Amino acid sequence: MSAELEELERALEGELEWIRARRTKAGWPEVQARLGMEKKPIAFGGVTPEHVRAAVRLLARNAALRLEELQHRVERARASALWDRLARLADEEAERHRQASGARLGQVFANAAENVDFWKSQWDGAKNVLVLLCKTCGAPQERTRDYRCGYCGGELFRRQEEEP
Ligand SMILES: [Zn+2]
């Protein structure tokens, strides 16, 4: 059954490569169209880390929808590792784009909770911190009191290890 998980991981890598190849003014509208995003024109400065973050959140959400379906059929540790990856993916891709485009730090992160270093420290420091994704907007959230997204109010995904 792990073939399903491998297929999902492979598809995700392919989608990421597809997006990375379109981080230009000319290419980005294709990304917006494919992910069903509002088509906002790209300003003079080009594709920003925020553009990348918004797109990859949706990509991660789409992958999470599939992971939610198959998580009960695969090894729990592997499903958990992919949940972690999906929760970090948008921040990591935004940071990758920032470095590639030479944008200044400080333009990238809207708040401390979206800083890659923040998430990394969460993972390194406390293994049991669960970060979930919003089913609507794909935003990552540390699980606290409830399963509602702090950004859009959408429902959060539930990992297998979170279920009673
Ligand atoms: Zn949300």
Image: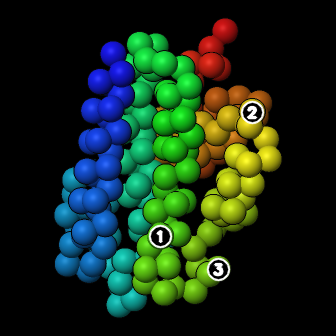
Q: Residue furthest right?
A: 125
In the rendered image of this protein, does residue 49 appear above or below residue 146?
A: below
How far is the residue under mark 2 from the one under mark 3?
29 Å
- Within 10 Å of disc 1 (Cα), the crowding (few <14, some 14-19, many 20+) is some
Picture residue at 45% right of the left edge, 51% below the top: 57
Picture residue at 71% right of the left edge, 29% below the top: 146
- Confirm whether residue 63 shows in the render: yes
Q: Earlier in the sequence, mark 2 or mark 3?
A: 3
In this image, 46 relative to 96: left or right? Answer: left
Q: Name which residue type carries label 1.
A: Arg
Q: Earlier in the sequence, mark 2 or mark 1?
A: 1
In the rendered image of this protein, does residue 110 appear above or below residue 72?
A: below
Picture residue at 52% right of the left edge, 60% below the top: 92
The residue that disc 1 covers is: 96
Res. 65 image quadrant: top left
Nearer the camera: disc 1 or disc 3 = 1
Q: Secondary structure at mark 2?
A: loop
Q: Name which residue type carries label 3.
A: Gly
The residue that disc 2 covers is: 128
The residue that disc 3 covers is: 106
Q: Secondary structure at mark 1?
A: helix
The N terminus is located in which quarter? top left
Q: Mark 2–mark 1 contact, CB under 8 Å?
A: no
In the rendered image of this protein, does residue 26 appear above or below residue 54?
A: below
